Image (cartoon, helix red, strand yellow):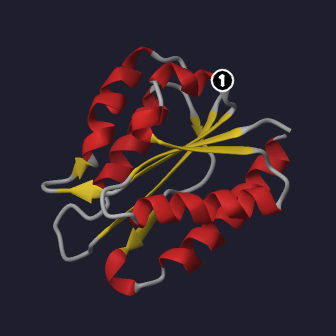
């Protein structure tokens, strides 16, 4: 089975927790997964994986988490045709640009040729359902990965 790469950017730990919940569901389903903080990854590393998951919290006026800013820009030269992607992130619905970072990353994956496997996961920090929503989304994701493999 093809490996999954999860790359996350997290300042307060919420998106990191989401990555961990998603990773554990995939591992329970015997899907090989590598989970890394974005500052540990070079964009070219994405090419080594058929399945790419990106996760970022949203800051200020709809900005990516700070560690993701350069990474997202440096992705521009990648050709992700033949790769499958999905995006997740957290944010607060109190703010105008709720989970805008998720939309930015999904748009980037699409523009580079990646096929998006399922609607992005956007967790509202105010609802306190991060683990539940992450695990539910990951179960659907695992079904998609198994079907593709």
Give x and y (percent) for residue 79: 53, 17
Q: Is residue 66 above or below residue 139?
A: above
Q: Secondary structure at mark 1?
A: helix
* Residue toward you, 27 or 74: 27
Residue 129, placed above or below residue 66: below
Closer to the camera in the image, 133 or 27: 27
Q: Residue at position x 43%, y 39% from top? A: 38
Asked if residue 111 is positioned above or below residue 125 in the image, the reply reads above
Q: Quadrant of the C terminus?
A: top right
For this rendering, which residue is in front, 117 or 101?
101
Is residue 140 visible to us here? no
In the picture of the structure, the residue carrying the numbered disc 1 is 48
Residue at screen point 51% across, 19% down: 44
Q: Which quadrant would the N terminus be assigned to in this image?
A: top right
Q: Is residue 59 left or right of residue 118?
A: left
Q: Indicate left or right for 44 with 61 as reference.
A: right
Residue 50 on image: x %, y %:
69, 31
What's the residue at 26%, 75% (across, down)? Answer: 93
71 horizontally vs 85: left or right: left
Q: Is residue 10 left or right of residue 130?
A: left
User: Which residue is the extreme one toward the bottom?
Assistant: 127
Residue at 54 percent of width and 57 percent of height: 19
In the rendered image, residue 48, in percent from the top left (x then y), is placed at 65, 23
* Residue 71 visible from this viewpoint: yes
* Number of other residues with Cα within 10 Å of mark 1, as a class: few under 14, some 14 to 19, many 20 or more: few
């Amino acid at each position: 089975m093809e490996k999954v790469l999860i790359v996350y950017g997290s300042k307060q730990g919420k998106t990191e927790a989401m990555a961990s919940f998603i990773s554990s569901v995939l591992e329970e389903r015997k899907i090989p997964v590598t989970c890394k903080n974005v500052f540990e990854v070079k964009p070219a590393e994405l090419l080594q994986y058929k399945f790419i998951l990106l996760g970022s919290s949203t800051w200020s006026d709809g900005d990516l988490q700070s560690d993701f800013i350069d990474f997202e820009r440096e992705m521009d030269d990648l050709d992700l045709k033949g790769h499958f992607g999905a995006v997740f992130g957290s944010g607060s619905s109190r703010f105008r640009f709720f989970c805008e970072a998720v939309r930015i990353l999904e748009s980037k994956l699409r523009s580079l040729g990646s096929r998006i496997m399922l609607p992005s996961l956007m967790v509202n920090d105010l609802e306190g359902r991060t683990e539940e929503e992450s695990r539910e989304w990951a179960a659907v994701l695992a079904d998609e990965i198994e079907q593709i493999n």
